[in-house]
Amino acid sequence: MDRVIAVVLAYLIGSIDFGVIVPRALGVDIYKEGSGNPGTSNVFRTMGKRAAAMVLLGDTVKGVAAVAIADVWIGGSTAVAAGFFAVAGHVFPAWHHFKGGKGVATALGAALWLEPILGGILSTGWILVVLVTKTASLASMGAMLLYVPGFAVAGERDSGLWWAAATAGLVIVRHRANIQAMISGGERSVKGS
């Protein structure tokens, strides 16, 4: 029963969508701006660096928090499962009509708690790819393609590795339109005010 409570709590924490909250606090309905996606990239494009930084930080911290609670309380693969449920909450947030973002920052936050070196490498790599290519979706795909191998190298096995794969898979599926746009050469760059 504790495991069920831990992952439900992780989902509810993940449902706190800073991509909606920060713009609303600044008087903007992000669903009506840019791509309509309540994620860091759309907030950056439509509202600028400061608002995007707040969204990125909030979405990362909630990934850390959801996993930390499960890890301290129960540990083991339940903590990795909590990462998946936090991302699922971000993607399908109960508090925001199940219309969420793509889950990258939350997944990276989970990795930062579970495997700090891996999380640091993935996060730094994401930032560097965005700075060089100006394409957040390319950075996100790179981070998610390295997510499972990274956890495997860090020593995660069995159900924990499956939960890591489910997390990466969910984020990749949420990027399917971006993947199609990259293939066709029409992916939008990250440019803000």
Image: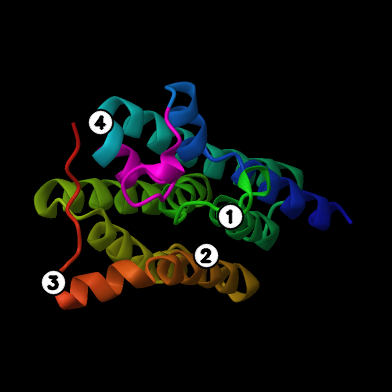
- Closest to the camera, between mark 3 and mark 2, is 3
> Which residue is labeled 2 in the image?
167
* Label 3: which secondary element: loop
Residue at x 12% of width, y 55% of height: 133
Q: Which of the 4 quarters of the picture holds residue 30?
A: top left
Task: Please state the extent of the stretch shown in magenta in the rendering.
Answer: 28-44
Q: Amino acid at mark 3?
A: Gly
Other-residue count near label 3 (Cα within 10 Å), few / some / many at <14 / 14–19 / ≥20: few
Disc ID at residue 48: 4
Other-residue count near label 4 (Cα within 10 Å), few / some / many at <14 / 14–19 / ≥20: some
Answer with left or right where residue 65 lies relative to residue 42.
Answer: right
Q: Amino acid at mark 1?
A: Gly
Task: Work out whether mark 3 precedes mark 2 in sequence or the reverse, and give the earlier one.
Answer: 2
- Closest to the camera, between mark 1 and mark 3, is 3
Residue that extends furthest to the left in the rendered view of this protein: 132
Task: Work out whether mark 2 precedes mark 4 in sequence or the reverse, and give the earlier one.
Answer: 4
